[in-house]
Amino acid sequence: MVAPLRHVGELEELDDEATAELLVLARRSVAALRSAMSPHGFNVGLNLGEVAGAGIADHLHLHVVPRWQGDNNFMPVLADTRVMPQALQATKSALEDALAGVEHSRIN
């Protein structure tokens, strides 16, 4: 999840600098996730408003979700089940290492 420091609930409330920074950080997140987890693709998006699924009131944020061919994204819908293929601490460590590497390299 990528979130601006300023607490705003609507995209049009961000100035141009914050909007650009949001995408730069999303790009950096994609690069780190690609390096750490080798996903086949990504879902990147915003949920604007409660009816659209925004879960944090008045704090816009961008989701960066790695995806794999055949992943089990149907599980929460069909079986109300969450599947964790990796311990959260292991994921955190891998992403910290990858973000440190992305920070020192150029992202194209």
Image (cartoon, rainbow, N blue to C red):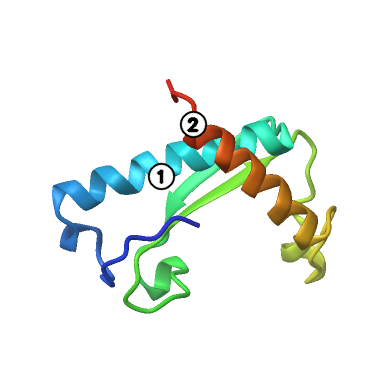
Could you tell me which secondary element the residue under label 2 belongs to? loop
Q: Position of residue 90 (x, y in %)?
A: 79, 54
Camera-near label (1 vs 2) is 2
The residue type indicated by label 1 comes to Leu
The x, y position of residue 85, in whole percent, is 85, 53
Give the side of residue 59 with respect to residue 67, left or right. Answer: left
State the SS at label 1.
Answer: helix
Q: Residue at x 28, y 72 (%)?
A: 7
Instruction: State the residue position of label 2.
Output: 104
Q: Quadrant of residue 54?
A: bottom left
Badge 2 density bin: few <14, some 14–19, many ≥20, Cα 10 Å? few
In which image quadrant can residue 31 be found? top right
Give the percent coordinates (x, y) of residue 15.
Answer: 14, 54
Is 50 or 59 nearer to us in this picture?
A: 59
Which residue is farthest bottom?
Answer: 57
Residue 25: which numbered mark, if any?
Answer: 1
Q: Give me the disc on residue 49.
A: none
Q: Is residue 49 left or right of residue 28?
A: left
Quadrant including the C terminus: top left
